[in-house]
């Protein structure tokens, strides 16, 4: 019985020695999303600069991120709703602290009638040292389509 107990504890210690240690801190911390313009003409893309901190293990070759986008619709006298834009891409944000995109991200918008809208990105990060993928929603940036 003592030998069985010692055997159990020694295998538990060996297992602990091989135990993976995960880093589940945020893949990216968005410091600011700065639109190039908040008043667009129909057919113009939404363009923005991003200021952020990003973990190195969430960027190729160690990790990756897929960015998708949605437009929030603000109908008069009704609750806002959103539609996903039929457009996604791999993240181009380089890893590091106090980073900023040097050229704006440009996202084609669906056909929108004049009025108020919101723009938001969603990123799904796969980081080498994280226990699971992370989904991060950016802030909603208000913009309008001019008549």
Image: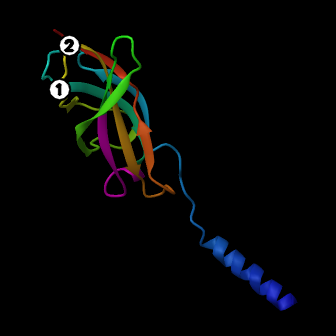
Query: In the displayed structure, does residue 39 sit left or right of residue 98?
Result: left
x, y percent for residue 17: 64, 72
Residue 41 lies in the magenta stretch: no
Disc number at residue 133? none
Q: Against 141, is 92 above or below?
A: below
Q: Earlier in the sequence, mark 2 or mark 1?
A: 1
Tell me which residue sits at (55%, 57%) in the image: 22
Spot the residue most to the front.
Answer: 77
Query: Which residue in the protein does label 1 denote?
Result: 45
Tell me which residue sits at (36%, 58%) in the image: 62
Q: Against 91, is 77 above or below?
A: above
Between residue 44 and residue 9, name the one nearer to us.
44
Question: Residues under labels 2 and 1: Cα distance?
Answer: 14 Å
Q: Mark 2, residues whose alpha carbon is within 10 Å: few (<14), some, or many (≥20)? A: few
Tell me which residue sits at (26%, 26%) in the image: 48
Query: Which residue in the protein does label 2 denote?
Result: 114
- Quarter of the image where one finds residue 7: bottom right
* SS type, badge 2: loop
Q: Which residues are magenta?
A: 57-69
Between residue 66 and residue 24, name the one nearer to us.
66
x, y percent for residue 1: 87, 90
């Amino acid at each position: 019985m003592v030998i069985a107990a010692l055997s159990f504890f020694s295998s538990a210690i060996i297992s602990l020695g091989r135990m993976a240690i995960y880093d589940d801190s945020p893949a990216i911390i968005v410091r600011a999303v700065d639109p190039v313009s908040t008043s667009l003409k129909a057919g113009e893309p939404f363009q923005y600069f991003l200021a952020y901190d990003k973990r190195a293990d969430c960027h190729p070759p160690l990790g990756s991120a897929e960015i998708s986008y949605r437009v929030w619709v603000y109908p008069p006298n009704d609750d806002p709703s959103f539609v996903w834009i039929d457009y996604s891409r791999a993240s181009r944000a380089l890893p590091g602290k106090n980073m900023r995109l040097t050229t704006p991200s440009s996202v084609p918008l669906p056909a929108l009638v004049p009025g108020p809208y919101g723009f938001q990105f969603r990123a799904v990060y796969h980081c080498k040292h994280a226990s699971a993928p992370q989904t991060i929603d950016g802030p909603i940036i208000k913009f309008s389509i001019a008549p």
